[in-house]
Image (cartoon, rainbow, N blue to C red):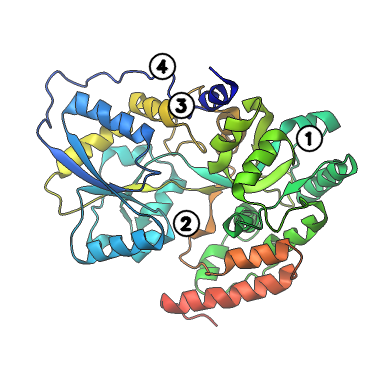
Amino acid sequence: MNKKVLSVALCGVMAMGIPTVSAVAEEKPYEGVTLTMWAGNAEYNEGTKAVMEAATEALGMEFQVEINPGGSEGDNIIKTRVASNDLPDFLCYNSGSKLYDLNPSRAFLDISDWDMVEKFDDAFLSSVTIDGAVYGAPQSSTQAGAVIYYKPDYEELGLEVPHTWDEFVANCQALADAGKTPIYFTGGETWATQVLFLGDYYNVAAAEPDFAENYTNGTAKYASTPAALRSWTKYEDLVDFLNADKSAATVSDGNLAIAYGDATHWFILTQQLPMIIAEADNPDDIGVFGVPGDDADNHGLTVWEPMSFYVNKDSENIDAVHAFLDFYYSEEALDLYFETYGANGPSCIKGYELPESVCNAVRVDMQAYFDEGKNTPALEYVSPIKGTTCEQLTTAVGLGQMSGEEAAAAYDDDCKKSAVQLGYEWE
C-alpha cells in the first residue's frame, strides 16, 4: 500500500476489513419493499451505501436513491416538492435554519416517540426540533469550525495548544519569528474565510447566552455586542501572520499547506481533515483545537450538526423506514458506516465511541470537547438569521481592506434584510 492510501485508511476514510453486520433475524420482514430516498452525493456516500447493503441483507428492503443536485438548485427543488406533496419515502436535508424554510410540519413525520431519538444528543436535537416536534435523525457525524494545525511545528518550538486568544496570537508571533507561516488564509475561495467568524460563536454564546434569541429578534447586534464584535476584530490581529498568496489561495491549497507543514494553522471546517490527512506523512501530525476566546477555563468548540434524515409523513412505507433507521443507529451499523467512510467530528449518538480507524484529530482532539461538554451548535442551527454577504465581508476584513467594526456594522445591515424577509421586526 502506498503512503497516500495508507494515510487515508488511517483516518478511517477507506474501508479496510469492513465488518459484516449480522442479520437481525433469519426472516427478512421487508423483502419486496423498495424505499425511495433523495440525498446529495455527500450523504449518499460509501458509508451510507454499506449500511444500506447490510440492511437489505438483514431486513430485506431495497433502496432507490435520487441525487440532489445541491446548492440553491437543490433547495428550490425540495421546496417545490414539499409544496406539491411529491416526496420520496425519506430524504436527507439540512439541519438548523434551513429546515424552517421547508415548514416541516406540512410534510415531515414527527418522530418524537421513536425510541431511537433517545440516542441523539441534545445539541443535535435542538437543530431538528420545531415547536416541540422532532423531525430529523443524524445522517453522519458532526464537524466543527476550528483550527486545524500542524503539530510538528508546535513540537519544534515547544508551543502548547492555546486556550485564550492572546495565547494564540503569541504562538503566531513565535512561529513568525521562527520563519514559519502562522496562518493560512484562502481569499481565493471566500466561503472558507468565514470560519474564524462562525467558529468563534462558542465564545459569543459563553459570554452572551441569549445572543441567538436576541439577534433573531433584532435586540442584539454584532456591532454593539462586545463579545460578538470580537468575532470580527480577531481578523485584524492576524493580518501580519498570513500566507503570501492570501488573496488567491484556495481550499485545495490549504489542504496541502497544512499537510506539508507549509503553514501551521488554518481556520476551516473539519470536513477538510480527510483531504489533509491523505497528503500528510503521518496522520498524527494533524491536530484540531477550538477557536480560543478570553476564558482559559472555557475553551470550547463550535459545531456544525450533520445533515438529517426526514421521513415523509404520507409515505406508505413508514414502518420500513423506521426499521431501517433503527438498524442505522445500531452500534454495529454505526461502526460499519464510520469504518467505511470516516468521520469529520464526533458522533451525535450518545455514548457511542468512534472506531480506532478514525484519525486522532477527530477521535481524540475533538472528542475531548464533547466529553467535557464544551461544544455548542453554530449560530445557524439556533437562529434563522444569516446575511448573504458574510463571506465577502470576512474576506475583506481578513485581507485588511476594512476594519472589524466596519464589517460588523455592514453584516448587521445585511442581516436586517434577511430578518425582514423572514417576518421579523428589526430596529
Residue at 82% in and 41% down: 180
Closer to the eye: label 4 or 2: 4
Under circle 2, the secondary element is helix
Nearer to the camera, 298 or 20: 20
**Residue farthest to the bottom?**
427
Q: Which mark is first along the chain, 2 or 1?
A: 1
Which of pointers 2 and 3 indicates the residue nearer the eye? 3
Which element carries disc 3, helix, strand or loop?
A: loop
Q: CA–CA distance between discs 4 and 3?
A: 10 Å
Instruction: Using the image as rendered, state which of residue 388 and residue 253 is in the foreground.
Output: 253
**Count of marks, rendered view:** 4
Give residue 31's position: percent from left, percent from top.
Answer: 11, 30
The residue pinned by badge 4 equals 17
Q: Secondary structure at mark 1?
A: loop
Alpha carbon distance from label 4 to label 2: 36 Å
Task: State the mark number for residue 160.
Answer: 1
Q: Which residue is mark 2?
A: 381
Q: Amino acid at mark 1?
A: Glu
* Residue 6 visible to an observer of this rendering: yes
Specify which label sits upstream in the sequence, 1 or 3: 3
Q: Pointer 3: what residue?
A: 14
Q: Are marks 4 and 1 in contact (CB under 8 Å)?
A: no
Label located before the other in sequence (4 or 1): 4
* Disc nearer the start of the sequence (2/3): 3
> Which SS class for mark 4?
loop
* Mark 3 neighbour class, 10 Å CA radius: few under 14, some 14 to 19, many 20 or more: many
x and y percent of residue 88 in the render? 20, 51
Tell me which residue sits at (64%, 30%) in the image: 280
First in residue order: circle 4 vs circle 2: 4
The residue under label 4 is which amino acid type? Gly
For this orientation, the residue located farthest to the right is 177
